[in-house]
Structures are given as structure tokens and as C-alpha cells.
Amino acid sequence: MLTVTVQSSAAASGTVLATIDDREAQVGMQHAQTQIERTRNLQGKGFVSKAALDARYCRRAIPKRPA
């Protein structure tokens, strides 16, 4: 989690303005990394193409749009 605090006279110093929960993003990144490792292993054994591995990397870099 990321917490933003105030360091100005507009609000009391140390006041929490916002808290961002990044647990969902962290789980998504772990899942993407697992999928990349799986695809890399399959590509090394000749079961999937280099293009499939490249596509896996691209899917990790491009976030999905909210439904």
C-alpha cells in the first residue's frame, strides 16, 4: 500500500490524504510472471513458438482496460 501524507500548511502536517491499495496489481504481475515462465519453458521444449513467448511479454506490458 502507498500512503500520501501532507507536508504543507494547507492541511495539518502528517495528515493522510489518500491510501492506494496495490495488492490487486501485485497479484496480476505475479500471475503474468508465472505465465511468462510457463511459456518460456514450453518454448524451450519446442511446444510453443517464439512468437507465443513474445506475445506473453506484450500482454504483461499492456494493462487490460476495465470492463
Image (cartoon, helix red, strand yellow):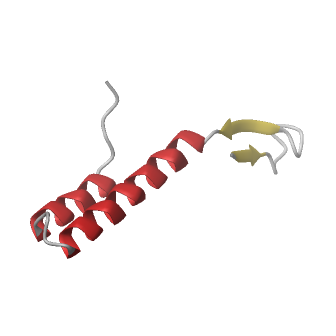
Residue 16 percent across, percent down from the top left: 80, 38
57 versus 22 height, above or below: below
Q: Quadrant of residue 23?
A: top right
Q: Report the residue that reaches farthest toward the top.
A: 67
Residue 14 percent across, percent down from the top left: 88, 45
28 versus 35 height, above or below: above
| Left or right side of 9 for 60 | left
Residue 43 percent across, percent down from the top left: 19, 69
| Left or right side of 54 for 14 | right
State the residue in front, 11 or 66: 66
Count of number-bearing discs: 0
| Left or right side of 12 for 27 | left
- Give me the residue at 81% from left, 48% from top: 8
41 versus 18 height, above or below: below
Placement of the C terminus among the 4 image quadrants: top left
| Left or right side of 47 for 64 | right
State the residue in front, 6 or 39: 39
